[in-house]
Image: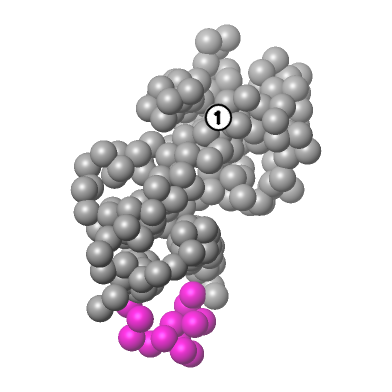
Amino acid sequence: MGRACCEVVLIREFRLNKEPCPEGKKSYHHGNLRETLIESALDILKEGTLADLSLRALARRAGVSQTAPYRHFEDKEALIAVLKAEGLCKLGEGMLALMSTEEDPLDRLFKLGMSYVQFAEVYPAHFKVMFEYELADYNKYCALHDVSDNSFRYLQETVNECLALPSARKLDPSVAQFGIWSMVHGLTVLLMNQSMMEHMREDHFENFGDRNQIAEQVVKFFCNSLVKT
C-alpha cells in the first residue's frame, strides 16, 4: 500500500468523533459508539497510565454497558492496536507533508525531527500507547503493520539525502539513520517528563530556554553533525 493511500485509509478508519456532547457527557448511537470508545480510551490515557485502561474502565468512562466495547474490540490488545495505528498514521501524515514540500534535505531533517517532538505534545495519549505497550502478536493487526515503518522510512530517506551532499561527513548510513531516530525519540520522552525537565533546568541548564527552544537546539545539533562546517 502506498504512503498517502495507506494513511488516508487509516485516518478514515480510526477517525475520532470531536463533536462536544451536552452537559459534558458522551452520547452515542450504533453508528458512533466505536469513535466514542476510542475517544474515551484516549481520555483515560491522558489522565493515567496503560494500567488504568481496560474495557470495563472504558465502558464506565463512555457511559455504556460493560459488554458494549466488545462489539468493536475483542480485548484490550485489539483496542490498543487501533490506538497505535491511529497514532502512527497521524505521525506519518505530518512527516509525509514535509517529504513533499521541503527540498533541502538538512532543512527537511530538522523539520522532521521537530514534527516528531511536536506530535507527542499534541497527541500525548497516542505517543504513550505507541511506545509503552508491546503487542503479543504484532502481525495480527494488518492496519498497524501497514503504517508501522512509515515515519522511520521518511527519516531514513532524508538522512540518505543528507549524506549524499558534497559537504556530508563519511558516516555509516545505518548508524546515522538509527541515530536520528534515537535522538528525536529520546529527546521527546525526556521533554514529556515535566518534573524532570524542571529539575534539570533549575540545577543544570538554567539558560536552556523553553521546551521548544530545547528541542530546536538539540535537533539542529544532530543535523549539523552530518555535514562538515
Q: Is residue 43 magenta?
A: no
- Rendering coords of residue 206 (x, y %): 38, 87
| Circle 1 SS class | helix
> Which amino acid, by three-letter code, is at mark 1?
Asp
Q: Which residue is mark 1?
A: 146
Q: Going by the picture, which residue comes out furthest to the top?
A: 30
The residue stretch that appears in magenta: 197-209
Residue 105 sits in which quadrant? bottom left
Please state the horizontal and vertical placement of residue 82, each as a whole percent of the image: 60, 30
In the rendered view, tell whether residue 11 sits above or below residue 121: above
Can I make out residue 110 in this image? yes
Few, some or many C-alpha atoms within 10 Å of disc 1 (few <14, some 14-19, many ≥20)?
A: some
> In the image, is residue 202 part of the stretch drawn in magenta?
yes
Q: Is residue 110 left or right of residue 44?
A: left
What percent of the width, then of the height, locates residue 47?
A: 58, 50
Viewer-proximal residue, 13 or 105?
A: 105
Asked if residue 225 lies left or right of residue 191, the reply is: left
Report the quarter where the C terminus lies.
Answer: bottom left
Please tell me which residue is depicted at 75% across the width and 22% down the height of the picture. 74
Q: Residue at x 64, y 33 (%)?
A: 81
Instruction: Say above or below: 6 vs 223.
Output: above
Q: Of residues 160 and 11, which is closer to you in this image? A: 160
